Image: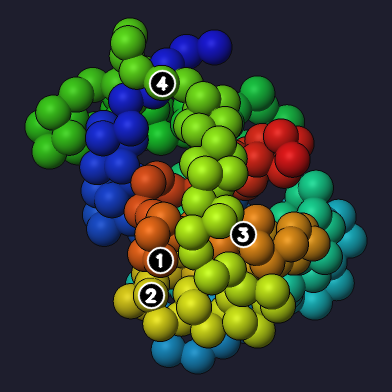
Amino acid sequence: MRKIDETILKTAVEYIQENYHIEEYLKEFNMLDGAVAGGIDTVIVICVFHGNDSHPSLRVDKKRNLYKCFACKNDPKNPSGGNLPSFIAKYKRVVKEENVTYFTVIDELLRNDPVMQLKVGAKSIFVEGSITTQEIAKSNLKKSVSFKLKDSRPKTYLELSRKIRTSCKGDENVILTSIHLMESGMEPEKIYDMLFEDGKIIKRKDYSDEDLNDLMELE
Ligand SMILES: [Zn+2]
């Protein structure tokens, strides 16, 4: 498995979220047929990820470059939602049947964008000597064990949601990640351990669908 530099990854994702437009990918992927407006900056399109969507159910926030399908959400193995690279990766995997991941998509965008390379200070997110995504997932879980006794951990999803709402400062990525995990049926205390450290939100990295699957498999 190739190794990823987390700082480069984080900066690249931030750059993509700020400078790329999910709407252009919707056009490129022919996903705007039958689309309806879902409010300012939001469009709801037919979801190509869960097979036979007859009316629009994939919600896209054009301004924030985020997507979420409310029909796919009950499928814990295939949750649909995330940021722009997650959307591109999902489309290429599910529709084009290409062998890509969240990380290879980010890497390809970076390799083809000299401006991003300057901003990020690297031409690839893959380097020698950094930790692998599997190791990140494992270290998150290991951390969770050591904090079990210290924190007052939420026993219910309601308590957990309150804690996230008051701590995440509107961070969409944290919110989407927590929604994914709740939908997967993971216990509130475990989700809390993954997202919090010493009572504060951990902003370690952007979680993709694949990361979440990895984390769930490690359970
Ligand atoms: Zn769907």
Q: Residue sitting at 65 percent across and 40 percent down?
A: 215
Q: Secondary structure at mark 1?
A: loop
Residue under pointer 3:
191
Residue under pointer 4:
131
Q: Earlier in the sequence, mark 4 or mark 2?
A: 4
- Residue 60 is at least partly visible in this image: no
Q: Is residue 218 above or below residue 4?
A: below
Q: Secondary structure at mark 4?
A: loop
Q: Earlier in the sequence, mark 1 or mark 3?
A: 3
The answer to whether marks 2 and 1 mark residues whose Cβ atoms lie closer than 8 Å is yes
Q: Nearer the viewer, residue 182 or 89?
A: 182
Q: Residue sitting at 50 percent across and 33 percent down?
A: 139
Q: Earlier in the sequence, mark 2 or mark 1?
A: 2
Q: Which mark is residue 216?
A: none
Residue under pointer 1:
199
Tag 3: amino acid: Ile
Around disc 4, counting alpha carbons within 10 Å, would you say few (fewer than 14), some (14 to 19), or many (20 or more)?
Answer: some
Tag 2: amino acid: Ser
